Image (tube, helix red, strand yellow):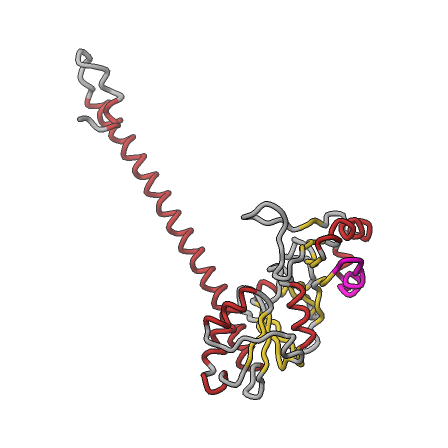
Amino acid sequence: MPSPALLKLDNGPNSNPPSRRGSMAAIQSFGGLSMESSIQSQYVKEALKRATMQLEVLESAKRLAAYTAVDHHILPEHTVIGVGSGSTVPYVVDRIIQQGDKLNKNRVFIPTGFQSKELIVKGGLKLGDVDQYPTIDVTIDGADEVDNELNCIKGGGACHLREKVLAEAAETFIVVADYRKNTGLLGKSWKQGVPIEVAPFAYAKLLQNLHRLGSPEATLRMAKMKAGPIVTDNGNFCIDAPFDEAYMQDPHDVSCYQRLGILRLMILRLVLDISLARI
């Protein structure tokens, strides 16, 4: 059977055989398509390679930040430890486990949500809760964005309430963040808005208040794999409220806009320590 490139030159049994010149042109055309396909394939391979390298750098930054934070701030005398949420937290738990059974057998770990609870249990660490241990030696958590004054936005993972409670219950609060999170000004890269956890019955009134107070684009956070809004581990709703840059120059002004129904508005001022990885 003739190749696809030659089929166009063969119009039937009574047609004249293709000329040598026509055959060569068809073969060159076929070869050109093969070359173009090869170039595209090489381009895709190079793009995938670059993406893989970027991902490796990012994961290395997360690991470095997490390991550094644990090494400097999870000390032998710490027996009650809060574990936060986010993409850096698995590295935090890994490093804690590496500290050894001798230290960890006398420790209890308080999670901020389902993710950290699973990490604690799967790591063979002792699980506790803040109602059992209202005073925490150290809480280590992630952040969505950090500014030059060590204010940070948290709550992208919808663990607002427990994250804030564990932060306030801790003698020392540590934030682990890779280089992308250090943007100088809140809202510069985190465009979703300030996360707010709200009682379900109060969300409509709170949205109305936020629209009047300077966040006209504040919206209820909707789920992607279910119909309806995101529901937190504590059964609440989430609102994301973007504010103009002028508001975010002093995040304390935004955090003062708490109104009816707000359980936690996640802007924190880090008064103790922050671990940032720069690579």
The total of numbered circles placed on residues is: 0
- 108 lies left or right of 216: left
Q: Is residue 153 placed above or below 1 in the rendered structure?
A: below
Foreground: 92 or 145? 92
The answer to whether residue 113 is above or below residue 5 is below
Q: Is residue 200 left or right of residue 123?
A: right
Whether residue 275 is visible, yes or no, is no
Q: Quadrant of residue 51?
A: bottom left
Q: Is residue 274 above or below residue 217?
A: below
Residue 131 x %, y %: 65, 75
Residue beneath the point at 71% across and 70% down? 269
Name which quarter of the figure residue 38 lies in: top left
Q: Is residue 3 left or right of residue 36?
A: left
> Residue 267: horizontal and vertical position, in percent?
71, 64
- Front-most of 156 and 253? 156
Residue at left offset 61%, top offset 72%: 175
Tell me, yes or no, if residue 178 can be seen here: yes
Is 100 within the magenta? no
Residue depicted at 70% across the width and 74% down the height: 168
Q: Nearer the viewer, residue 233 or 255?
A: 233
The residue shown at (39%, 47%) is 43
- In the image, 224 versus 53, the foreground residue is 224
Q: Identify the magenta region.
A: 249-262
